Each structure stands twice: as structure tokens, then as C-alpha cells.
Image: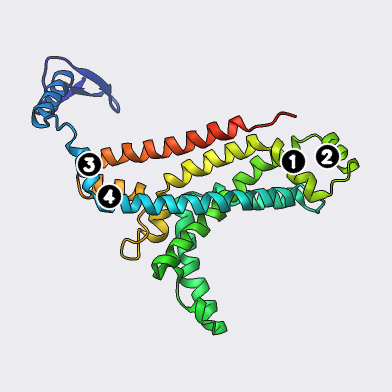
Amino acid sequence: MEQSFHVPGICRSCNLLIPGRGNRTILIWCISDIYKLGRRIQQQNLFVGLKNYAAVVADSSFWQSLGLTLLYVVVSVILVNVIGFLLALLVTGKIKGKNFFRAGFFTPNLIGGIILGYIWQFVFNKVIVYFGDALNVTVLQKSMLSGSASAFAALVLVTIWQFSGYMMLIYIAGLTGVSEDLKEAAKIDGCNESQTTRYIVLPLMRASFTICMFLTITRCFMIYDVNLSLTEGGPYGSTVMAAMYVFQKAFSAKQYGVGQTEAIILFIFTAVIAVSQTIINKRKEVEA
């Protein structure tokens, strides 16, 4: 015999049947009560106009975290792309074990940000300090995560380690896409290796630079997982990036409206910078 279970407080005006195990069926009345719930929420939450934006403008901690994030983005984007390009030059050169090095450099990008942060937290707090004590090196005896500047440097270092391998693959595609005929012609004209790279290879790789810049800018602006697991915003809130601050404002402080407004501002800020550099670099692209 079919059994039905009534959920107290739910309207009987319409129903939804959800099969259960065996001959049991859970009978749930839902639609009109969802409508009533929505009306109740609407009545309790009045339109606040621009009050949330005014609160964000007055929130100095948010702008401080956004400024720190901007500094982090500038440093990380430059170093990630420079190192990624140098790695691409290395693994496309005349060395043995190219595939091994490519896989090795790319592997950190496959590790999740949370796990990656905890791994490096262990390295900074335990491994490096242990070797510092064993070798009696004063600089290494103190964890990098214990100071504001050193914790910021540690965050940048982990970001470079994570993203450089991925950018390397994009640069490898750009390097291999440059015609060998153009390189040979440059050498015939008297260009050495560095001149060929500067005047022939780099201009033809503008598309690769555009893609890598866009990816690194957006990823660095939205960093949260590594920030959470590596430093947790410490010490004393000195490494709280904008994404972490927005999360804390909305879900820890329960200021959902202000947190959502800050998230919108962060998105606009990121989109303007990322799209602007894309448009500028697209105009400078050179076709072979």
C-alpha cells in the first residue's frame, strides 16, 4: 500500500511526487508556499537604493584589500609570464627529456588551490625552518608566513609555482607556431639568437602574450583558495585579498548586501583591466 508523508506547514494546493525506496512516496506540497515565502522576504527587505555602495565607499578595509590585491596582481602577472616564457624557451630548445620537463613544470597547475596552499604551508612552517635550524641559517629559522611582507612574498611564490607551467604551454604553442623560414631568413641577414627572438619571435607571439596576460590577471584578481589555505589572511589580516574580504563581509559578518556590492565592484575592476589589456594587445598583433 502506498504511504504518503505530509510535511507540516506546506500548502496542499499543489503537490510534487518524489518516489522513495520500495512502495513509499514522499508527498510534498510546495509551489504556493514558495511563492508566499518569496512575498514574505520581499516585504521584509525594502529597496535600499545606493546605501550599500555608500557603505562600500566608506569601508577603508575593502579598499586596502583591493590595493593589496592590485600589488599582488602586478607582481604575480609579471613574474608568472616572464618565468613561463623562459620555461617555454628552455623546453623548446635543444635539451634532452623535453616531454619530462614539460610534464614536470605543468604538474603544479593540476593541484587544487586548497591542497596546494596546505602543502606550501607545511613547507614554509616545517621543512624550511627545520633545515634552517639544522644548518644554522638565521634567515631560514623563521617561517615566511610569520611576517607581513614575507607572507605576501610567499603567496606570490606559490602563485608563480602554480601558474607558470600552464602559461608555459601557451608560450610553447606560440613559439612552435613561428615559421622556421622566418628564423632562417633572419639568420641569413646576420641576426644572432637574441636578435631573432627579439625582432622576429616576440612580435609574432603577441597573441600568446594576450591570452596569458588575460588568464593571469583574472586568476590573480580572484584568488581565494590559496589565500585561505596558505595564510588565512594573516598575520593579523595583512594578506587579506579582495576576494577573501568579500567572502568574509558577506558570509562571516552576515552583511550580504554590502558583500554583494563589493563583489560587483571587484568584478568590474577586474573586467576593465583584463579587457583593456586585451584590446590594446590585439591591436598590436602581427601576422606572419
**Residue 86: x percent and y percent?**
68, 52
- Can you identify the residue that label 1 sits on? 201
- Looking at the rendered image, the disc whose residue lies closer to the viewer, 3 or 2, is 2
| Three-letter code for the amino acid on which mark 3 is drawn | Val
User: Which secondary structure, mark 4?
Assistant: helix
Q: Is residue 202 left or right of residue 231?
A: right
Label disc, if present, on residue 183 of the rendered structure: 2
Q: Nearer the viewer, residue 280 or 49?
A: 280
Residue at image coords 37%, 52%: 67
- Report the Cα–Cα distance between label 4 and label 2: 53 Å
Q: Return the x and y of residue 46 as percentages of the image width and height.
A: 11, 30
Question: Nearer the viewer's eye, disc 4 or disc 3?
Answer: 3
C-alpha span from label 3 to label 2: 55 Å
Find the distance from the CA under tag 1 to the CA under tag 4.
Answer: 45 Å
Q: Which mark is residue 248?
A: 4
Q: Residue furthest front?
A: 189
